[in-house]
Image (cartoon, rainbow, N blue to C red):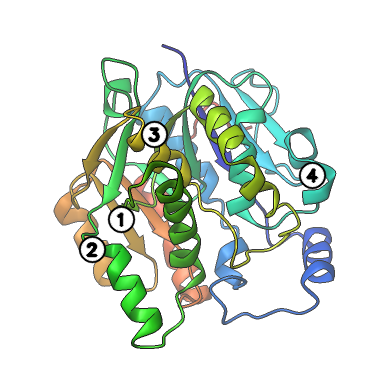
Amino acid sequence: MDIDLVYLWVDGNDPEWRAKHNAVIGRTEEGSAVNCEGRYANHDELKYSLRSVYRYAPWIRKVFIVTDRQTPVWLDTSNPKVRIVDHTEIMPVACLPCFNSSLIEHFLCQIPGLSEYFLYANDDMFINRPVSPEDFFAQDGLPIIRFNRRPFRKWILLCKERILHKSLSNYNLIIHNAAKLVEERYGRYYGGKAHHNIDAYRRSDLRYVEDVFRDAIEKTYPNHVRCANDIQRSLFYYAALAEKRGHLHYITQKTSFRFHIDNLKHYGKLEKYNPMLFCMNDSQYANDNDRRRVAVFLEKRFPEKSPFEQ
């Protein structure tokens, strides 16, 4: 099978992009998980992610980079295996400009020329050792769905809200939104939580889910930044599980590791577990020193240039 790779990418250091972003949100809230510096900061993580892909997954057919009128300065756009996809190519006018990855993800199936089978990644996600297509798609062609195990998640969230009177984080809330939609249609609530790393999808599955839940998804079109009624992409996987169109695998730290860049202990854990995949997650808790440390680490770990670079 032909397998493509799709990234979302933004250069939050670009003054033109920042001006457009600030004009939409009206103000900056650097301490917010929804709108912090780490959500948009660019330290060329994409370059090193592509180096990891070239080293460990050379079988990828083509790379699509979804952006908002931006192109990495180091990218070799003459390489036929890579293509920049602007938001305007795949998203309706009602969504633009969009700074909400949860919304953008609902339009990945609209990418021109995208193969039926594809992987999806953020620019801070990396392959750590050799992988094969079978690590992402089973022999029957169905995607392998990697979740963190979260038993009793529905009741834990309800207890937190109704008994402890604590608000859910935006991230947990939008996953819960997706789970509730699937529960309403199929009668089952899936509590597994996405592993926040490179995932496998079939384009036809995304199109099907977008059609089934179109009314709910269209209500999120005006959400230029993350909002409480967003529907996280777990919707695709919850629906696939309900219809037996995927294979559920619960992750361990040896398969998928979420690296918090503000936690120095995670550097040792990465070496200890040597996972198949890892994500160097920036957040409202990280600072510029943490980000500079990541840049040094990635250059040391993936020093060889890839054909995607000039």
Relative vertical location of residue 126 with respect to residue 27 in this rendering, above or below = above
Q: Which mark is residue 265?
A: none
Query: Looking at the picture, how far across and down is residue 100, in whole percent?
Result: 65, 57
Q: Is residue 278 visible?
A: yes
Identify residue for label 2. Answer: 152
Question: Disc 3 residue type?
Answer: Ala
Identify residue for label 1. Answer: 191
Q: Residues within 10 Å of mark 3 (few under 14, many from 20)?
A: many
Q: Residues within 10 Å of mark 2 (few under 14, many from 20)?
A: few
* Element marked by disc 1: loop
Identify residue for label 4. Answer: 69
- Residue drawn at (69%, 44%), measured in percent from left and top? 67
Q: Residues within 10 Å of mark 4 (few under 14, many from 20)?
A: few
* Element marked by disc 2: loop
Query: Looking at the picture, how far across and down is residue 85, in whole percent?
Result: 71, 34
Identify residue for label 3. Answer: 240
Real-space CA distance between mark 1 and mark 2, rounded to the nearest whole angstrom: 7 Å
Question: Disc 2 residue type?
Answer: Phe
Q: Which quadrant is the C terminus positioned in? A: top right
Question: Disc 4 residue type?
Answer: Arg
Of the pair 202 and 126, the residue shown nearer to us: 202
Real-space CA distance between mark 1 and mark 3, rounded to the nearest whole angstrom: 14 Å
Closer to the chain start, of discs 1 and 3, is: 1
* Element marked by disc 4: loop
Real-space CA distance between mark 2 and mark 3, rounded to the nearest whole angstrom: 20 Å
Which label sits in the foreground, 2 or 4? 2
Closer to the chain start, of discs 1 and 2, is: 2
Residue at the left extreme, as displayed: 272
Relative vertical location of residue 3 with respect to residue 27 in this rendering, above or below = above
